[in-house]
Amino acid sequence: MAFVIAFLLLLPAVALVAAPPAPNISTPSITPSSPGPNDQVTVTATVTAGNSGVLNVTLVYSTDNWKNTNTTVVASYNSTSQLATAHILPQYNGGHVQYYLVAFDGNGNKKVNNNNGNYFSYTVAASPASTTTNTWIELALVAATLGVGGTIAFHSMRSKTRTGSSSTSQN
């Protein structure tokens, strides 16, 4: 009986030692390293998982500091290079993007790499107004100003006629 109790007490320790480790996710990198408002950002990270292999990798990102919206993207995974790749859409209006990666292995173990709760992030500068658009706006303002100025000048230079009665003298 003592043997059975001792065995049962050791069983949880054996189970902890024998449990396969969760996947490992490296620190991700982004390309381009300083994205502009028209750039799709590629996020890559090395993901490994013991003998069970990597089942899937997802990228979760937010453009509003996790207030209302987050987007989950399934990453492609190359088991030979152990590289996971996902894409974040262009941020046409600029903004701050925060993201993290989640991986599952074939045993159902889950690993989250969220930079210890600080999330990985990058900032996209707002797109400056198009130079062409600015030029057309400036030209329109100049044309309107010249038009108004010309109209005022035309009205002030034309001959003035008097209205009322006119008298003619006859002898």
Image (cartoon, rainbow, N blue to C red):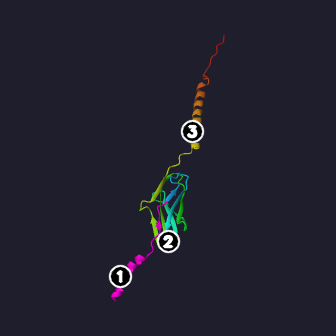
Q: Amino acid at mark 1?
A: Leu
Q: Position of residue 54 (x, y in %)?
A: 51, 70
Q: Which residues are magenta?
A: 1-28
Which callout, 3 or 1, points to the residue nearer the camera? 1
Q: Which residue is mark 2?
A: 105
Q: Which residue is mark 3?
A: 138
- Which residue is at the front of the view, 69 or 42? 42
Question: Is 159 positioned to the left or the right of 55 in the image?
Answer: right
User: Looking at the image, which residue is at 34% across and 85% down?
Assistant: 5
Mark 3 Cα-neighbour bin, 10 Å: few <14, some 14–19, many ≥20: few
Element type at mark 3: helix
Q: Which residue is mark 1?
A: 9
Q: Main secondary structure of the magenta part?
A: helix
Q: Earlier in the sequence, mark 1 or mark 2?
A: 1
Q: Which mark is residue 46?
A: none
Question: Is 5 positioned to the left or the right of 106 in the image?
Answer: left
Measured in 3D between alpha carbons, the distance from the residue under mark 2 to the one under mark 3, in whole angstroms, is 59 Å
Please tell me whether residue 59 is drawn above or below residue 14 in the rendered image. above
Q: Position of residue 11 (x, y in %)?
A: 38, 81
Image marks 2 and 3: residues in contact by CB distance under 8 Å: no
- Which residue is at the front of the view, 65 or 52? 52
